[in-house]
Image (cartoon, rainbow, N blue to C red):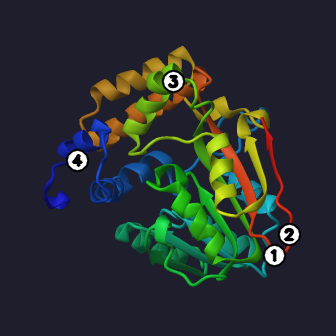
Amino acid sequence: MDVRTLTDRQLVEQIEAGTAVRQGVVDEYYQRCIPVYLDFLGVHWHTGFYRDEDAGVSSRDQVRMIDYIANSIGLNKHDRVLDVGCGIGATLCHLSRRLSCEVVGLTPVPEQKKIAECLADSRSATIQVDLGYAEALPYPEDSFDAVIFFESACHFKDRQAFFKEVCRVLKPGGRLAGEDWLATDLSNESQRVKWIEPICNAWAIPMLGDATEYRRLMEAAKLVDITTIDMQTIMPLHKGFSVTEKELDELQQEIQQCTNPLLALTLRGMARLGLGVNAGAFTIGHSVARKPPAGHEKKSRSIS
């Protein structure tokens, strides 16, 4: 079946069915969602780093998150950096302009690559965007000083393969840092079924991981100096989500009035995220690791 022949409603039905959605369906969905995301989220498609003292939320929060992740591994102008799941390239553009480092992005969606290149031109940023998948990075080994990701790994069908590929393409001593959607405790079956599976079904996610799984996968990939941080321990996570009864009621009204299937699914997804945050079932996790130089001793810790 050619997924391009599906109507938006048929495409959404396949995504929301939540059973082994084909990669081609997911790619087509995220290609069609570009106008919705641009209107709804702007150019940064990830959670921000929120502060209690700020009155509301804005794109400044998302830029602050980029800087937080970059600073966590000391990105600098001498680094060659790969952003896996780069979307439309806003992170690449920001890092190119702020740090003057060499930045490369990877996306499986051709339209995202096109928009990223146009965005770079409009912002006088120097970036490279390639097409490909995280589980088979199209680069030689020892190619990058750093690999980063922003809420993309949760979408990967084989996260173990991704982390192994990260270790392969990093130079010895190279760094990994990212932030991602996580379940707080996947061992809690009732919590997973009630709160996590509905989130996954709205956002074309195979299944959210948790910090324990990410740490285990990074260790299995031979990464070292691993740190995982639950971001709600260092920032007011709830500020980025619809969590009050009033906010959720308003979101439900929008969903009922919405005639665009793609936007309606996005709104349902936002509501489910808010419910997951409220229930303590969903969080944002920050991961840092390193490819070992020869003879480096493995260390791992977590902050929760």
> Amino acid under label 2?
His
Q: Which residue is mark 3?
A: 189
Q: Which residue is mark 1?
A: 293
Mark 4 or 1: in front is: 1
> Amino acid under label 3?
Glu
* Label 1, label 3: how far apart the Cα atoms are: 39 Å
* Label 3, label 4: how far apart the Cα atoms are: 29 Å
- Dot 3 falls on a residue whose secondary structure is helix
Locate the N terminus by quadrant.
bottom left
Q: Which residue is mark 2?
A: 296
Query: Which residue sits at x=51%, y=31%?
Result: 273
Q: Are marks 3 and 4 in contact (CB under 8 Å)?
A: no
Q: Are marks 2 and 1 in contact (CB under 8 Å)?
A: yes
Query: Which residue sits at x=67%, y=41%?
Result: 212
Q: Nearer the viewer, residue 39 or 153?
A: 153
Residue 100 found in image quarter: bottom right
Q: Nearer the viewer, residue 292 or 123?
A: 292
Q: Residues within 10 Å of mark 1 (few under 14, many from 20)?
A: few
- Dot 4 falls on a residue whose secondary structure is helix
> Amino acid under label 4?
Leu
Q: Is residue 52 left or right of residue 107?
A: right
* Label 2, label 1: how far apart the Cα atoms are: 6 Å
